[in-house]
Image (cartoon, rainbow, N blue to C red):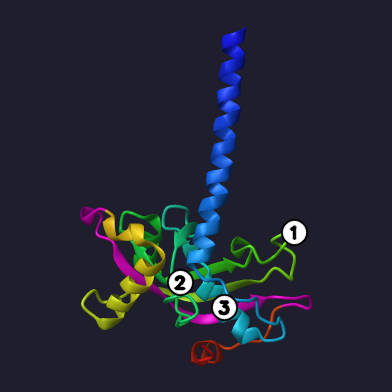
Amino acid sequence: MKMKSIRVLHVHVAIVLFLVCSQNSMAHRRSMLSISKKPDPNDAIVTARWLVSQNFWAVLNTISIDLGGAPWGNVVSFSDGIPDQGTGIPYFYLTNLDPTVKNALKDQRASFTVSEYPLGTCGKIDPENPTCSKITLTGKLILVDEKSKEAEFGRNALFSKHSEMKGWPMDHNFQVYKLEIENIFLIDWFGGPKPLTVDEYLKWKGH
């Protein structure tokens, strides 16, 4: 009976340590990303660029070749540049072993959804609450020419947020992809999506 109590105690201690370490890890990641103040919801362009610049993972959706053309979402790491100095264009480090790439090689249409919630700036409200901002970028998932300056920029942008990527297996043939944006859907307050063109989004130079 005594040994059983000790085992239960060890399990409880392990759970507490896991939760503490998880919180410390998230706090470190947030500090590393230098999260700036949440923009005014009346400023749609700034909010949109802020969401993409500050986040480090989101859901990338492609048209599945294995599910008869059904939409298929995948959690992916991404970067649009160094935090607060991004371009607005999300870059990804993907392998052709991933269904996302296999789908894109057949049909480039894709959408990319980013939520404010992982940043910790939504407070206690639910992620679906309109005041917890979210953005969906729709367009084409494109392979960036490996020898181009853009590919070099993409790698630097990705590695600045995801240093682990530098050591990913060479034989998995990871390459830089980007989303060529064609449409933007932004919710950051009550009243429906904010009007925002791709041109306005990409040309913003408010750093």
Q: Residue at x 60, y 84 (%)?
A: 46
Q: Position of residue 108 (x, y in %)?
A: 41, 71
Which comes sooner in the sequence, label 2 or label 1?
2
Q: Nearer the viewer, residue 145 or 133?
A: 133
Residue that numbered label 1 is attached to = 124
State the separation of the CA atoms marked 2 and 1.
Answer: 35 Å
Is residue 142 visible to the viewer in this orientation of the structure? no
Provide the residue span drawn in magenta: 169-192
Q: Quadrant of residue 91?
A: bottom left
What number is the disc on residue 186? none
- Indicate the amino acid at tag 3: Trp
Q: Residue at x 60, y 86 (%)?
A: 45
Residue that numbered label 2 is attached to = 109
Residue that numbered label 3 is attached to = 50
- Indicate the amino acid at tag 2: Arg
Q: Position of residue 13 (x, y in %)?
A: 58, 30
Q: Position of residue 96 (x, y in %)?
A: 30, 59
